[in-house]
Image (cartoon, grey):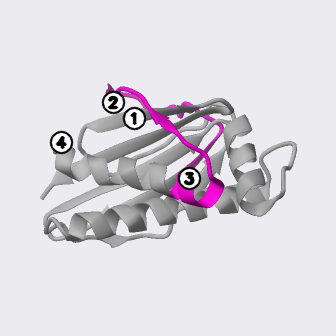
Amino acid sequence: MNVEFINPFLVSLINVISTMATMDLKPGKPQLKNHDLAKGDVSGLIGMVGPKTRGSLSITFEQPLILEIMNKMLGEKPEFINDEVTDLVGEITNMVTGGAKNLLSEKGYDFDMATPAVVSGKNHTISHKARGKKIMMPFSHEFGNAFIEICFEDS
């Protein structure tokens, strides 16, 4: 998978969380992922289709981190993941994908985005529809971890 294609999603997540929640996520080392089990407690998944590619992106947060992001963004801090938190994860997924789409369009990549789906709960799974390699990128913060998964196939 092309690094030129992956980096805009990573940059966009860091920008969205930094701008909207004034929190800095520290990127870790990317790795291949060969299973569907999510690493965190709540995930946003969005599909993308374009003339040159199709794939999906997921962003997963551990509960303490997403609750702190909600606190910083909206001034609300529920004790557990509820409907407002899952709505926020969907919005963050949209913002990250939209930011990456803008960066990628400058490089000649074009794609349409679906509406994000959000899944939560311990040991939930993420089903990427594309038949490509899954790259997982971890991010850390003192409140917990976040993970981006990107799966694309060339058409």
Give the residue at mark 3: 17
Whether the residues at callouts 2 and 4 have beta carbons within 8 Å, the answer is: no
- How far apart marks 2 and 1 lie (CA) works out to 4 Å
User: Which tag is nearer the camera, tag 4 or tag 3?
Assistant: 3
Q: Is residue 31 above or below residue 19?
A: above
- How far apart marks 1 and 3 lie (CA) works out to 15 Å
Label 2's element? loop
Tell me if residue 42 is in the magenta stretch.
yes
Q: Which residues are magenta?
A: 16-43
Marked residue nearer the N-terminal end (2 or 3) = 3
Label 3's element? helix
Marked residue nearer the N-terminal end (4 or 3) = 4
* Residue type (three-letter) at the residue carrying disc 3: Ile
Give the residue at mark 1: 137
* Residue type (three-letter) at the residue carrying disc 1: Met
Local crowd size for mark 1, using a 10 Å CA cut-off: few (<14), some (14–19), many (≥20): many
- How far apart marks 2 and 4 lie (CA) works out to 12 Å
Front residue of 47 and 109: 109
Q: Position of residue 144 (x, y in %)?
A: 64, 31
Marked residue nearer the N-terminal end (1 or 4) = 4
The numbered dot on residue 30 is 2
Give the residue at mark 4: 1
